[in-house]
Image: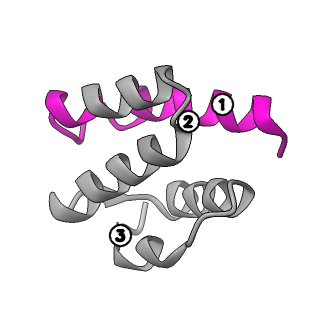
Amino acid sequence: MNQDDIMRHVNALPGRFADRLDFSGLDDVRDAARAGEWGEAVDILLAGLITSHVTVTADERDELRTLLTAMGMATDPIDRLSVGNT
């Protein structure tokens, strides 16, 4: 995954989770992504998903893990996500 792929994935995250996270948190994710702070955007998103106990799919979890790995970030927060059976 190159920098363009990372940017595209991070910028798509708020829309992907819009129905499960509050507007304020998603706005923070968007702001960080627009500023090119992709790691911060992902950190904010993960914090929101974890603290709100939002259920993600196994595919979403795996995609987030892949994104973190591509960015050279710790994947530990992924283990704290609530993963559903869908």
Q: How far apart are marks 3 and 1 (CA)?
A: 22 Å
Q: How crowded is mark 2: few (under 14 residues within 10 Å), some or many (20 or more)?
A: many
Which residue matches tag 1? 7
7 left or right, relative to 53 = right
SS of the residue under disc 1 = helix
SS of the residue under disc 3 = loop
Which residue matches tag 2? 10
Which residue matches tag 3? 81
User: Is label 1 in contact with label 2 (beta carbons under 8 Å)?
Assistant: yes
Q: Does the magenta stretch include residue 84?
A: no
Residue 63 is tagged as none
Q: Is residue 2 magenta?
A: yes
State which region is magenta.
Answer: 1-26
SS of the residue under disc 2 = helix
Task: Please tell me which of labels 3 and 2 falls first in the chain.
Answer: 2
Q: How far apart are marks 3 and 2 (CA)?
A: 18 Å
Q: Distance between the residues labelled 1 and 2?
A: 5 Å
Q: How crowded is mark 3: few (under 14 residues within 10 Å), some or many (20 or more)?
A: many
Relative to 73, does residue 21 appear above or below in the rendering?
above
Magenta stretch: dominant secondary structure: helix
User: Is label 3 in contact with label 2 (beta carbons under 8 Å)?
Assistant: no
Q: Quadrant of the C terminus?
A: bottom left
Amino acid type, callout 3:
Leu
Q: Between label 3 and label 2, give the one nearer the viewer.
A: 2
- Residue at 36%, 56% (x, y): give it: 46
